Amino acid sequence: MRAGLTKSIPFSLTLDVAGYPVLAEYETRRLFMERDMSFRFGSRVISHVGVVGSGQIGPDIALHLAKALHARDVRVTVIDVSPDALARGRAKLEQKVAKARDSGAFAPAVADAILSGVSFTSDYEALRGAELIIEAATEDVSVKRRISEQLETLCPPDAILASNSSHIEPARIFETLEHPERSLVIHYFFPAERNLLAEIVPGPNTDAALTQSVMELYEAIGKVPIRVGSRYGYAVNPVFEGLFLAAAIAVEEGLGSTKEVDAAARRALGLGVGPFTAMNLAGGNPITHHALDEMTSRIGPWFRSPRLMKDAMASGTKWDVPKRDEQVVLSPEAEQRIAETMIGACFGICGEIADSGIVSLPDLELAVEIGLAMRAPFTFMNELGVDRALQLVEAYAAEHAGFPVPQCLREHARTHQPFQVDYVLRRDEGDVAILTIRRPQVLNALNDAVYAELYRKFAEVRDDPRIVAAVLTGFGTKAFVSGADINFLARITTPADGVATSERSKLAGNLIENLGKPVVCALNGFALGGGSELALCCSARLAGKGMPLTFSQPESNLGIVPGAGATQRLPRLVGLELAASMLRTGRGLSGREAVECGLVREEVEGDLLAAAIALARDAASGKVELKRIDPEPLAAVSALPPVDLGHRSRAIDALICRAITEGCQRPLPEGLRLESELFGSCCATEDMRIGVRTFQESGPRAKAVFVHH
């Protein structure tokens, strides 16, 4: 048996009551760790970014870039030939920054740095030498061509020339350039500084390495980039504009007024705002009017600008929509008719895009959900049943000439198989497989579907003779995995459910731990709860340099016993004293502290993923030996050192202490089974219900009032 006590490590990062970092403070500290540096990604360096166009979206793009890059002293220059447009754009940006500062979203120093890093000018010479320029001018191909030709003469040979076109194919925009290989579309979505989605659309001559670089850049600066093939409207706008068209047709057919259809469509599709409200907010009537008529020949005959839109264009009035918090009540029959109409239209439109092959189904699913703030369409089809989904599409198509019935939906209904929506992406770098957990809406949180997919994909890695090692990472820059999805935990109703859930949650980690091939965890951000437990199963862990938070087990704040292995693996890695403190109080470790206690092998300055791939390959070849968790029992400890439990549940703490002291005196597999049983026991407590309910109703920062039984 081994001794299980190590020195205690202080930790001072502010956590909210669920153990999550207070993001405003976290971001401020992270961004200001390195100053006076250009932004580096891969082999590229960016010190100056240009935005051409100070109209509807250009200032918002500039705000996003300044917000993401100001800490590296990257300059952002906005160009427009109209002095009035420049003045309006500057005022718009300043107003948004002031609002964010007043709300606490930006610290005062961050707000000041953003404002000082953006300049507005009509002089194109100010862009000379910029490494990235995004044209955000009006949606007119001749205007965009003239601008791109002018920019080509100003920029270095390796500069990236992008267009924020919402519809026009890259080949049409850049066909007159001498070097179109360095050009592509980067399509932002409203509001550009906050909407996470960015469609990355290369043209036929775009260099493949440049496209990959832009994908990596936009992930690094906080967007969710989706690669889309070149077709008019790309992947998401046909959904946005198609849903508006379906809503307008519903009004024309007498299913309801614009206000009623807007409200019913929002409820049916889980939209943040209804299609008419969205059109008002985005000021999209002129673009949508033109785009729908273009789509008739470019996508399909159902698409067209409806009479309702033509009338609105002629009158110049906004759509009549529900006011904020206004309740629009329809008869059950009217509600159902509009719902079935909008759902059938949505499924058909999304299925046609999937059939077109311009985007993968998982990417389309994520893009629609994030970019349009609505229910994920293919998951919605699965939940409704693919047979029923097909019925709704066929019913809509029967009443609307030219509407597509997607082949992918026909095939899934024929086989009665749900659509497969991947949350774990795999790509191979030679003989090393890279698996990325991608659920950016919830900071890569885990649920049953993700656990099952991790198991399936690691089993494929295990059985693939071409692969010698693997790297596990998360999407984005904030979180490796933020923990278990709270809704996933809320569905547990009995102790037996709890035991079964805990056992299922361990399957992927157990496989990773015993894969027979080294698995390196590249901690692209913090690992909380289930994310920490997943990382503990890997052969080694690397973290980005200077992370204020790498690991935390915040379950005790929610009235929960960790259920995916932390009570057994963490003590074996860092010792009982530190592990018990982390498990019982939600205490976290910075990157430096995680290295000091042996939880992280090293902090990496630079390309974290490249370092993880190299380490995994070296471990597979025997060049480097990675220390595995010793599965033998730890030395017996009769009592754990006292900790300040604060508001936390004493009943849950007693179960956590039992898991640590009793479980760690058993071989690892037996200790893991005991943890599952104790997780089941916690599911019978009132405190778990209180903790989960408090989180759901009041958010992660609210302190649950536990009753200690």
Image (spheres, rainbow, N blue to C red):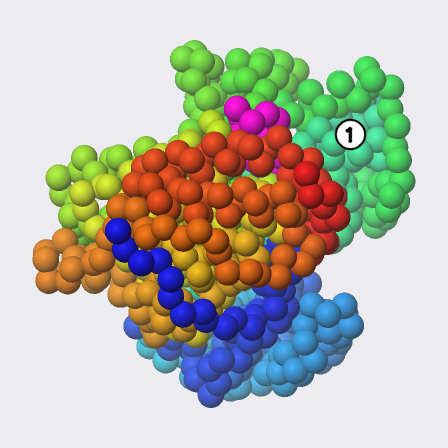
In percent of width and height, residue 196 lies at 57, 55
Q: What residue type is labelled 1?
A: Ala
Front residue (pair 383, 183): 383
Report if residue 496 lies within the magenta region.
Answer: yes
Please tell me whether residue 407 is drawn above or below residue 449 in the rendered image: above
Q: In which quarter of the image is residue 214?
A: bottom left
Q: Which residue is drawn at 73% across and 43% down?
A: 707
The answer to whether 220 appears left or right of 76 in the picture is left
Asked if residue 435 can be seen in this view, the reply is: no
* Residue matched to label 1: 264
Front residue (pair 95, 663): 663
In percent of width and height, residue 75 lies at 53, 82
Asked if residue 124 can be seen in this view, the reply is: yes
Report the quarter where the C terminus lies. top right
Q: Quadrant of residue 389?
A: top right
Q: Residue at x 78, y 35 (%)?
A: 262
Please tell me whether residue 63 is drawn above or below residue 113 in the rendered image: above
Q: What stretch is highlighted in magenta?
A: 487-498
Front residue (pair 619, 295): 619
Q: Which residue is drawn at 54% across and 42% down?
A: 655
